[in-house]
Amino acid sequence: MFYTPEAGHGLPHNPFSAIVSPRPIGWIATRGADGSDNLAPYSFFNAVAYVPPQVMFATTSAKPDRGDTKDSLGNIRETGVFCVNIVEHAARDVMNASSAAHPRDVDEFSAAGIAKAACQTIDCPRVADAPASLECRLTQVLKLPGAANFAVFGEVTGIHLRDDCIRDGRFDVTAYQPLSRLGYMDYATVTQVFSMPRPG
């Protein structure tokens, strides 16, 4: 099968959402200029540089009370900061609950029953029990083709690691089983890890 996005695929569901998978989930916490907190998962997310450490996520839709985007980017535009929380298998249900479409004044931490904690280097909440949280300062917002497509880049200014996830001097993903997005309504959990030394 071959198709061009312009012509369409003819399938009941868009295959593009499942082709690039698994995708890590960035659970993005923000605080608006008015002090309201927001938490939402994004599967267009990844780390993009080591020194200084940097991450990105993309938001691809809008809501009526935010104009051209959603609450996460709206808050980041106001404050210039955000916190990326890593999602574990055990948090799958509350992560999913936090993806509900709420008005901008609803705190998803409270709505989904998620414990929050304060960040150290930025004025922003974080998921208290996340395996890891990355405090970030905005470096740039890149407008992408499409009505509501934006890529958000940030420099990591502080890193929280849950103590039980540090084993033998390493941050060990087998301690918490990362959750990933496969596309459609499908997810996967990392349960098998293996190492391969680089050649040469």
Image (cartoon, helix red, strand yellow):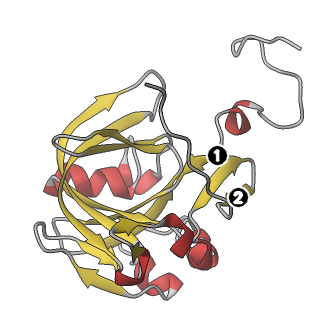
Judge whether 193 appears above or below 143 on screen.
below
Circle 1 residues within 10 Å: few <14, some 14–19, many ≥20:
some
**Dot 1 corresponds to which residue?**
22
Could you say which quadrant of the image residue 144 lies in? top left
Report the side of 64 relative to 55 (left or right).
Answer: right
- The x, y position of residue 159, in whole percent, is 23, 65
**Residue 187 percent across, percent down from the top left:** 70, 57
**Residue at left offset 41%, top offset 52%:** 70
**Marker disc for residue 188:** 2
Looking at the picture, how far across and down is residue 54, in whole percent? 25, 43
Which class describes the residues within 10 Å of circle 2: few (<14), some (14-19), or many (20+)?
some
Q: Is residue 114 above or below residue 102?
A: below
Q: Which of marks 2 and 1 is nearer the N terminus?
A: 1
* Residue 100 location, quadrant: bottom right
Q: Which residue is drawn at 43% across and 25% down?
A: 200
Tell me if 157 is positioned left or right of 107 in this view. Answer: left
Q: What residue type is labelled 2?
A: Ala
Label 1: which secondary element: loop
Residue visible at 75% across and 48% down in the picture? 184
Dot label at residue 10: none
Residue 8 position, x and y percent, is 78, 18
Relative depth, front residue between 189 and 45: 189
Residue 167 higher or lower than 65, as above or below: below
The Cα–Cα distance between marks 2 and 1, rounded to whole angstroms, is 7 Å
Q: Do the residues labelled 2 and 1 touch (CB within 8 Å)?
A: yes
Q: What element carries label 2?
A: strand
The answer to whether one can see residue 176 in this image is no
**Extreme residue in the left direction:** 121
**Amino acid type indicated by mark 1:** Pro
